[in-house]
Amino acid sequence: MPKVEIYTILFCPYCERAKALLGRKGVAFEEIDAPSGSAARKEAIARSGGRTTVPQIFIDGQAIGGSDDLTALDRGGKLDPLLAA
């Protein structure tokens, strides 16, 4: 299983949606609390190439993007191969 990391904040519906999708896939992930202005948020922005929204999702260090990006990968049949690597 690849390492999956997701930077989130509390009460974020997009974060919840992304975590639910990963959960349905049976994927273990590390959730990193990244409130605005925190060191974790700054790290997420740097790792994602400047994206400032949450969630920010990484699979084996590769920036995937946010919830919509994760859903698009799944609908396009491209998420399962990333998770099987």
Image (cartoon, rainbow, N blue to C red):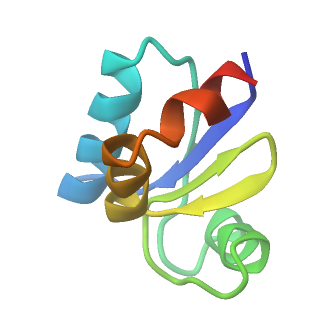
x 48%, y 77%: residue? 36
Write down the quadrant of residue 72 in the picture: bottom left
Residue found at the very far bottom of the displayed protein: 50
User: Can residue 12 be seen here?
Assistant: no
Q: How many marks?
A: 0
Is residue 15 placed above or below 20 in the rendered structure? below
63 relative position to 7: left or right: right
Between 70 and 15, the residue placed more toward the observer is: 70
x 38%, y 48%: residue? 76
60 relative position to 51: left or right: right
Residue 52 coordinates in the image, percent (x, y): 52, 83
Between 60 and 55, the residue placed more toward the observer is: 60
Residue found at the very far front of the displayed protein: 77
User: Can residue 68 be seen here?
Assistant: yes
Residue 67 coordinates in the image, percent (x, y): 35, 57
Q: Quadrant of the C terminus?
A: top right
Between 53 and 40, the residue placed more toward the observer is: 53
Residue 26 coordinates in the image, percent (x, y): 44, 11
Is residue 42 placed above or below 72 in the rendered structure? below
Is residue 57 placed above or below 37 in the rendered structure? above
x 72%, y 69%: residue? 39
Write down the quadrant of residue 31 in the picture: top right
72 relative position to 35: left or right: left
x 41%, y 62%: residue? 69
72 relative position to 79: left or right: left
